[in-house]
Amino acid sequence: MTLEFLDLSKTFSGEMEGESVHTLDHIEYRVENGRFVTIIGPSGCGKTTLLRIIAGLEKASAGKVLLDGKEMVQGSEEVGMVFQEYALFPWRTTLQNIEMGLEIRGISREKRRLTAMEYVKNFDLAGFENRYPRELSGGMKQRVAIARTLIMNPRIVLMDEPFGSLDSQTRNAMQEFLLKIWQKRGDTIIFVTHNVDEAVFLSDEIVVLSRRPARMIKRIEVELSRPRDRTSEECNKIRRDVLKILEEEMKREG
């Protein structure tokens, strides 16, 4: 599987008549199967907009997104997305939230329940399958949200700052949990974050975007074995490199 962005640009209409906001500027990129790619850049540069275009939730103003050489269509089941705010339905239990996509697909109640229970077990949610979102911790809610996406077996998993609202200890635990699931499944993940440490810990490759309108200014291969020591000199060197790129970008733009 290969995912390609070909000359992607996006411009939104502004609040005033005739006003426009240029968000993405000629993004060219290629993601190979099974890679964990992190996108990082200044706040408001267009990272989420890029994910939404890949997911088919926004239409590019110019350019294309190709999967194995074919243009992606809106609503494609090849793509799954995990949001920062969990996006769980408060009236559905853990189990019901996880199996929702299978229910929409018309899978029988017995089959989808059995499949969802496997995800409950594998995502350390046993004992909480009949709890509602209000009864779950932040980390549990995000595990439910990830399970609800992965149960659909998308070829590409998009994650928009999924751990941004968690405390640092829970965030670290969720990063390790995600890596364990990813290494077991081999999904292709595109992960947006503002956190440089998180990017270094998780990624095969870090893509650094400029300020809006976002351009790709650097691709950094993270050629470190896993599990990674967050405090190692190797991780710290990459962290310093990414921070330097971001700092220079901010200075360049004044």
Image (tube, rainbow, N blue to C red):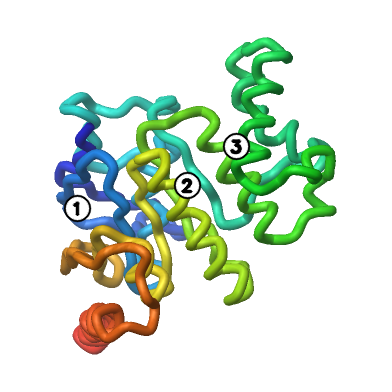
Helix, strand or loop at mark 1: strand
Q: Is residue 52 left or right of 151 when viewed as pictured?
A: left
Amino acid on which the number 1 mark rests in the picture: Ile
Cα–Cα gap, marks 2 and 3: 13 Å
User: Is 75 positioned to the left or the right of 62 in the image?
Assistant: right
Residue bearing mark 3: 148
Q: Where does label 1 land, which residue?
A: 27
Query: Could you tell me residue 165's position as x and y percent?
Result: 61, 67
Q: Is residue 223 visible?
A: yes
Badge 2 vs badge 1, beta-carbon distance below 8 Å: no
Q: Secondary structure at mark 2?
A: helix
- Along the line of sight, which residue is nearer the eye, 238 or 81? 238
- Residue for point 37% across, 65% down: 227
In-front residue for pair 15/134: 134
**Label 1 near label 3: C-beta < 8 Å?**
no
Left-right relation of 104 to 109? left
Tell me which label, 3 or 1, sits earlier in the chain: 1
| Of the two numbered discs 3 and 1 in the rendering, the one whose residue sits closer to the viewer | 3
Left/right placement of residue 200 relative to residue 128 reads left
Q: Is residue 107 above or below residue 235?
A: above
Residue type indicated by callout 3: Arg
x and y percent of residue 111 in the render?
66, 15
Q: Which of the marked residues, 2 or 1, is nearer the chain's N terminus?
A: 1
Q: Residue 32 falls in which quadrant of the image?
A: top left
Residue 181: assigned label: 2
The quadrant of the rendering that contains the C terminus is bottom left
Which residue is at 24% across, 39% downward?
33
In the picture, the quarter occupied by the N terminus is top left
Distance of label 2 from label 1 (alpha carbons): 29 Å
Q: Please give the label number shown on residue 111.
A: none
Between disc 2 and disc 3, whose residue precedes?
3
